[in-house]
Amino acid sequence: MRTEEILSGGEWVRTGEWIDVHDPADVRTPVARIPALAAKDVTRAYDHAERGFAVWKRTSPFVRARIMTDAARLIRDRADAIAADVTAENGKTLAEARGETLKAADFLEYYAGLARQGYGTLLHDVRPNHRTHTQREPIGVILVISPWNDPLITPARKLAPLLAAGNAAVFKPATETPISGLHLARALHDAGLPAGVLNVVTGRTAEIEEALLDDPRIVGITFTGSNSVGNRIRRRLADRNVRFQGELGGKNASVVLADADLPAAARAVVAAAFGQAGQRCTATSRVVVERPVYEEFTRLLVAEVETLKVGPGDDPATTLCPLSSPRQRDAVLADIGRAVEQGATVLTGGRADTDGERAHGCYVRPTVLAHVTPETAIWREEVFGPVLAVRAVDDFASAVEAVNDSDFGLAAAVFTRDLARAHRFADEAECGQVAVNTTTTGWDVHLPFGGFRDSGTAYKEQGEEVLRFSTRLKTVAVNLGFPEQTRG
């Protein structure tokens, strides 16, 4: 079986303890094993990061940019092998995995470009002969905790800006999908990243959590994952001066108004709901439809869903991949079962797919549920699977109310031909990301990204906005010492 090493202090190392990584398309045989680090190994990673930061923060921004650009090139050169590993450990289709790989390279290139710019502003000063400006500086050692659903692009989205700004990182990939993040680390290492600037930690969370979260050298934690874990981290940091950037849960809604292009809306909703088997933080999981077109839209929606082909990610014919693990599959099936018990009707799907070789994988049929109410658990709680709930409302105001009646506020979409109502929806939707006549998914590297309410913290990701998290602002005033001007 293939054995992986982790990057620590500029060297690739292994341990005597191991964790198996499984393919969710067929869980019978592990695809690789990764080191199961101990607490002392985590502390050593922070030792390396502390030393790496001392070097990296003084490294020319132009050198940082070159290293990140070279790393992006290496990822593109290795795209086929990386995508195959993303599919093997996560389950997503090769097309989705290749798209994720190339987008990870985009993140490195984008922030390499920003690294070449100065972060700051020239300000007027009331005092004569003074010039005042602000400048942004790196904050130090940042802990990066990434999820299993986007195992390459999420680490790239987090690491690229903090490295461009001159910070060092300890990176903890998800235990279920660590190989993808190791590809990112290897590309940066091979591109010339100095020792200690990036250190990878793999292991069983229960055994290393204290060492991972409580090290006094941490100045920031960026985390993507569940609300329960994110809130636990936030409570743990409550009495410490440590920044926390959290991208947490979502219950994203798409609104279909009576004047919408219904076939186009159905295609967009299906793409947003069932890409990566619904395992995207911005996946559409609720559809709010104006009552006059509810029956027609639901018919179009179900017909579109039933064209999806369930199968392993490495089959080119597959359009709906397995879920990432047996645990995730079973949780989604339990959510569907509870929804039916609460009165929901299954229009299509609603069960595991165990036909043939799929009996050994984590497959769930794409599911559409009707007859849900605002009180139905599946309407309110994140499922993170190929499940879509549909509900009719009477008018535009009721649709906006249904979107905003949620603890979450990550993404929403509206489908309409009415420009005024589109803009009104954008103003009134309580979400960090709003789409009009397009999917709730697909936000590019330069677009600020993050949710409201329980979907995240005030620190956005992506674009230039993310630099608020990974830098500190300093104001500098200089007395130029010019003699006072006198009248001649």
Image (cartoon, rainbow, N blue to C red):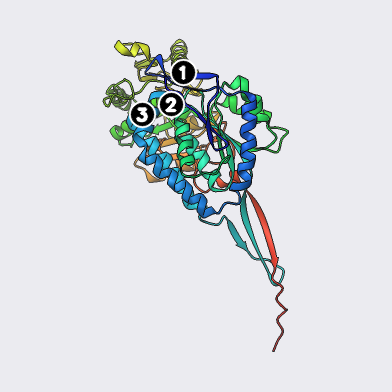
Amino acid carrying label 1: it is Gln
Kind of residue at badge 2 = Gln
Q: Disc 3 or 1, which lies upstream in sequence? A: 3
Could you say which disc has been placed on residue 84 in the image?
A: 3
In percent of width and height, residue 343 lies at: 44, 13
Residue 275, by quadrant, is: top left
Q: Say above or below: 481 vs 61.
A: below
N-terminal of the pair, mark 2 or mark 3, is: 3
- Please identify the quarter of the rendering in which residue 31 is found: top left
Closer to the observer: label 3 or label 1?
A: 3
Is 114 left, or right, of 239 in this rendering? left
Residue 443 showing in the rendered view: no
Q: Nearer the viewer, residue 461 or 53?
A: 53
- The residue depicted at 62 percent of the width and 44 percent of the height is 53
Badge 1 marks a residue whose secondary structure is helix
Mark 3 belongs to which amino acid? Ala
Residue 183 position within the rendered picture, expressed as x and y whole percent measured from the top left: 44, 34
Q: Residue 279 shows which numbered tag? A: 2
Residue under numbered circle 1: 328
Q: CA distance from mark 3 to mark 1?
A: 21 Å
Image quarter of the C terminus: bottom right
Helix or strand or loop: what does disc 3 sit on? helix
Residue 239 visible in rendering: yes
Is label 1 in contact with label 2 (beta carbons under 8 Å)?
Answer: yes
Q: Quadrant of the N terminus?
A: top left
Query: For this view, does 109 lie left or right of residue 169?
Result: left
* Total numbered circles: 3
Point 54% across, 41% down: residue: 460
Q: Residues within 10 Å of mark 3 (few under 14, many from 20)?
A: many
